[in-house]
Each structure stands twice: as C-alpha cells, then as structure tokens.
Amino acid sequence: MHAQRFTALTALAAASALVLSGCAGGNAAPAADITAEPEYSGTLSILTKFAGEPLGPYFENLAAEYEELHPEVTIELIQETDQSVKDKTKTLTASGALPDIYFTWAGNWAQNFIDGGLAADLTEVIEPGTEWGDTFGEASLSAFQVDGKYFGIPLYNNGKFMGYNTKIFDEVGIEVPTTFEELIESCAPIRAAGYEPIAFGNKDGWPALHYLQQLFAYNVPSDVLHADFSPATATLDDPGYVTSLEQFKTLVDECTDTGTGTNGVLYSTAQEALAGGRAAMYYQEILEFDTVTAEGNVVTPEMFGIFPLPVPEGAKGNPGAIEGSPEGYLINAKSPQAALAVDFMKFATSLENATVLSSPPYGQPSTIVGAVTPETSSAAVFDGITQVNEASELIIWLDTVTVPEVADAWLAGGEALISGGSTPEQVLESVRNASHSAE
Amino acid sequence: MLLTQPSKTEEGVTAALTAVTPPPRAPRRPGARRLLGLAWILPAVVVLAVFVYLPLVQNLGFSTLEWDIYSGSQEFIGLDNYTKLVGDPIFWSSLWNNVLYAVISLAFQVFGAIVLAAIIEGIRNDRLRRSLRAVYFIPSAISLTVAGLLFYFIYEPNLGLLNYVLDAIGLDALAQPWLGQESTAMVSIIVMSQWQGFGYSTLLFAVAIQRIPSELYEAASIDGIGPVRRFFTITLPLVREMTGLMIIVTISGAFQVFNEVMVMTSGGPNNSTQVLGTWLYRNGFVRNDFGYAAAIATVIFVITLTIALVQLWINRRRRVEW
C-alpha cells in the first residue's frame, strides 16, 4: 500500500514537472529555410568560443563590418572560452534558447545537435560542388557530414604537434626525435642542461587525452579504434590501449618536471614555460602556435619548430594519423533568421576574412582554400596545416569523439594514471565499464 | 502647542496625544483583517512559490525522467535515477567529501571562531580589538572564486608560494603537488575555505558576545572566576542561539559547496575532490544526464532540510533569555 502510494506520488510529481515545464520536448518553431533570400533586418545571435585575447576582436570586427554593410541588422555576440562554451551551449540548449549560429566541435558534440534536430541541414548551400562549398577544403566539410548531409560550417582546421625550442635543441645537441623512444631518451640531456624537457599541465584533464588519443591512433588498428568510439560496438580490449597508457605514463614520469603532480598545473602554465624559454617542448594545437611565439615572448617564430608526436617502434596502428579536426559553427534549425545566418557565415568565410583569421595575431588556420599561405600565416602555422592536410587520417579529440560518459571516464583515468592512483589496466577497465554503461 | 511646549510628565504627554489623536475607528471584522493580512504577504508568497517552491517540485519531477536536452524528449523512469545513486561510488565519495568539509568547518568556523571571538572581545585595547576584527574579516570580503584562484596559485607545484616557502625554510621534503594528487587535493581546498570563512563567523560571534550584559562578567570577576571558566559558564551558554544558527549555516554550506572546488580542481584528479554539487554539475553539464543530476539535487535538498529542521528543533527547546 505504502509502495503504491509512493509510486503514485512520484508519478504525480513527474507529471506536474512535465506540465510545469511546458512539455519541453517540443518546439513548434518552423524549420529553418536556409535557401531563402536573406532579409537584412533584425537581430542575429552568435555563440563563439573566441572570448578573450587575442581571439576576441575577430568576431567583434566581423560583426561591426557586417552591421555597417547591413545597417538594419544587429549582431548579438555571446563570446565564451574553450572551457565555458561547453556549459553555455548546454544551458542554452536545455532552456530552448540556442542562438541562431553556435560553435561546435566535430564528432559526438556536433552529432548530438544533429540528432536532436537542432542543426540546420546546409547541404543545399555548402556541399562540395556548390559555390560556397567549393571554397572549403573538402575534408573539412566532411568532418560535419552525417548520412550524406552537411550540417557544419568548418571555420578553421586544427591539429596537435610537439612544439619545440630549436635553440635549446641546438644547445643540447639533439635532433628532432623520429621515434617515441628517441623522444623519451632526449629528455635526460635536456634536463641536464637545465631545462624542463616537456612542459605539461593537466589541471583540466583534456591535455592528457590529447596525448592518449594520438598514441591510440599509433598503437590501435584504425578500424578497431573507430569501433571503440561507439559504446554499441566498443570492446576496448586491444593491447594497444595498455601500451599507449604505459607510454604516456613513461613520458609524464621521465620528461616532465612535475611528474605525478602534473594534474595541479594549468595547460597555460605549461604553454608559458615553452614561450618563456624554460621548457624545451610543449605538446600543443596549431591554434596555440602564434600565442607561443607572440611578441614579447622569449621564443620567437625563428626559434620555434614543430613535429608530430613520434611514432612508437612496432606500433600496430596508423603511423600517418594526426590528431585534430576542424572546428566550426552550426545554424540553429529552428532559427527564423536562418537565411541571414547563412549569409553572415558566408561573409565570415570569405577569402579576405579567412586570411585575416589565419594570420597573426589570430593564427587560426582557415578551412578556406588559399587562406593559409607562407605569406599570410606564420611559418609554423603553415607547416602544421600542411601536415594536417597531408595526414593519412585525422583522429578527432578523444573528449569529443565519443559519448560524454566514456570521455569522462578517460578524463578521470588519465588523471589517475598521472598521479599513480590507477594502473593502465585499471584505467582501461573503468573506461570499459563506462562504455558498457552508456550502451 | 505640543511642539513648542512639550509636556515633561506622563500625564501631560497623554493629554497632548489625546488632543491630536482622532477618535478610534470601529475594529475591523476578523475575516476582513485576515484578508488584509493575506494581501500584504501575497507578493512574498508568490515570489517564493515561483522562484523557490516551484523549482523544487520541478526538480523532483526531473529526477524521475531520462531527459535528452538535444531532442527535448523526456521519458518517465520512476526511481531509476535514485537506484543508480545507490550504486554510484563517486556519489558516495562526494558525500563523504561533503561530510569531511562539514566536520572541519564546524571545528574551525564554529568552535574555533567562538574561541577567537572571545579572545578578541576580551582585549581591553579598543584599537587593537577593532584592528584584529578587521584583519580576520578581510578574507571574507574576497569573493570565493577569487580566493580559489589565489590559492590555486599558492598551491601550484612549480611556481606556488607554499612549496617555495617550504623550500626556503628547509622543509622541501614536505613540498607537494597539493591539488594534483588525490591524497592532498580535498584537504587543500578545505583549508582555503576555512581561511576564507573563519573571519566572518568570528565577527558574528563577536557581535553575539557584545550583547552579553557586562554585569555578568563583572560579577564573575568579583567572585574570582578566571577567563577560561568565564568562557565556559557565561560566554558559551549565552551565545547558544548564535552557535545554533552558525551550525546550521556551516553544515548547510558544507553540503552546497561548489565554487571553490570548480575553480581549484573541477572535481579532479580522478574525481577525488568531487562534492555533491560538482558531481551534480558534472552529470548534468558534462555527461548530459540531467535526470540523474536532478536526483543528486534532491538528495542535497533533503540533507540540508533535515539538518536545518533538527537544529531548529534543538534550539527551540534550549532558548536562552536574560
């Protein structure tokens, strides 16, 4: 009797909640018409992840120029950082207040919005063969392609490389390592010369995942790795995972000064250690290159070199894979301003604006063909983007390629591995459990 | 007349008031008085209902749902989220961290603060007493987020002040990656929190001690009672209501802790500093499991409500008057 009453009360509470929340499931707004002629009036809201310096002014300038071209249009910018944009996007999604244009990563992050009907199908205007689509590198467009349809507007490409101080390498007398083992061996002489071999900060958790994903790509066969991203097909039992986790732990213990305490260091502190000439290497995204070599830093563009994380000997995965993916924007499928939103993004991705984006101080290598050249971009950015374009495979970030529950397990596992709280086998087991639970 | 020549006597005042007071109205009917009373409190009731009680009911409802924020679909799953709580080891470790936080906070921010307040209020030099109050209160004026960032840099393993000082005084063996390892991260956060909140509690207790009639202390001194016994027999019993209030506030605060953990560790490393608030956030905003997050929120509500009710009940039975 009591149980029945409790169940009835629970059901009543749930029903009340549904009523009170207005049955949040449905939004009766009409689907976006992206092919319509844009009406140059009203307010266009845009959620970016370019908050702060040096990226903040990019969209601010774009908005000002667009408003000048179309005086009846007002651009409402919501600028967030790499970390805060995640919370902001989910809050806006849950409250049914997504902006007309919003930032997205490739992989599971974008997939959620596409599956939820929140991303407009842009195929008619952006697929390869269309006027706008042909201005993009085709591989960039395909990062947001689902079931033959194109949903995303890739704004810039990205990839992960080991950035190094060429002066320190010369001083110590070492060459760019060609294998993972050589990389580890190079750490002792660098430390003996008074420098931190590899600066690393893992307070946010994801920097460890960047190392791990690149090592997984090297050590785990590509088809197995891709199957393991989805809980429905994942087995996560390839020996390459444990090998990768062991290699990562070796790198942390032997090549970083903070070792097991790396979880208490910000990635930006590590970035500054390289920029300040205190560290010889720092594993970083192309997007960071121009920040590391910005004016006033000890490391100048001439002293800065990059190489992909070297492949371990005997690795059974894809040695030509590079971790990275384009990042871009989706258009709200329920936006009444969808046509105007498309027009704004065409403006943002014009060759002129794409070149500005690719040049210092922004240094975000545009996905627009011809925007990144040795003349417009720094040498490191051009080198990085060339290697990304030539890579046999691009592997999306581990924290966005798989479902959040599994990504979260990798995140905690990476931290536990660094601090010594878990062995590689225990980390893999916890991820397997999370994947099983998410299935 | 009344203004220019005020009467000094009670009779005079009464007479003057009678002269200017209009004849009394007929008393309102009880029903009308009740309606008027309700009308006065209605705005407050509406605000409370909309912004406090309605979200509470909604949250209870959400905790019985599997909610996909992307598609907007909501499926009723009964008590599954609560069953999941029972088997979630991170939920239990988060709860333990909250309990640890509460226990240490009680020791410092209630019992430590009473002692410190009594010491400060016992200082005869006015200037020194005021200065000490200000010195202890200053950390409380700093936002918790700012304090968290400040301590993050104090604890930083490479460049942090704490390890630097330990190194400088020859205790470099004690230097740790304070926030970077499971064994020290939670305690390091709690230490920061005590630093931040200690002065505020001390100030409140100082105000409570100031309200104690000085005659009691004077009588005790004449009787030759020393300061320690005066503290236990006069101060402690007579600040009981403030103590009760501070216990509620401190424990409730300990179960709602969020900012300092998010700023300093985000719940890491390896979820070792998760508290209920951050675990709720992580499930909602990182794992997209808003139903489960709502279930955790319900647990936090039940815990804090229970603590508040118990403490209020105890205090009501032991009210002190003088």
Image (cartoon, grey):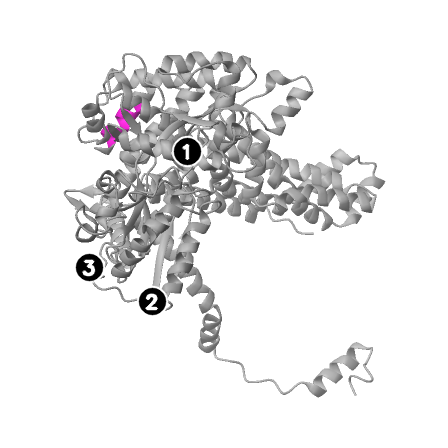
Which callout, 1 or 3, points at the residue further toward the start of the chain? 3
Say which residue label 3 marks. A35
Callout 3–callout 2 Cβ contact below 8 Å: no
Q: Quadrant of the C terminus of chain A?
A: top left
Q: In this view, does B164 lie to the left or right of B301?
A: right
Which residue is the site of mark 2? A42
Chain under callout 1: A
Q: How far apart are marks 1 and 3 (CA)?
A: 39 Å
The secondary structure that most of the magenta stretch takes on is helix
Q: In this view, does A301 lie to the left or right of B153?
A: left
Badge 1 vs badge 2, beta-carbon distance below 8 Å: no
| Residue A279 image position (x, y, % from top left) | 52, 23
Q: On residue A379, which mark appears? A: 1
Which residue is rendered at x = 27% and y = 30% of the image? A390
Label 3 is found on which chain of the structure?
A
Q: Nearer the viewer, residue B232 or A128?
A: A128
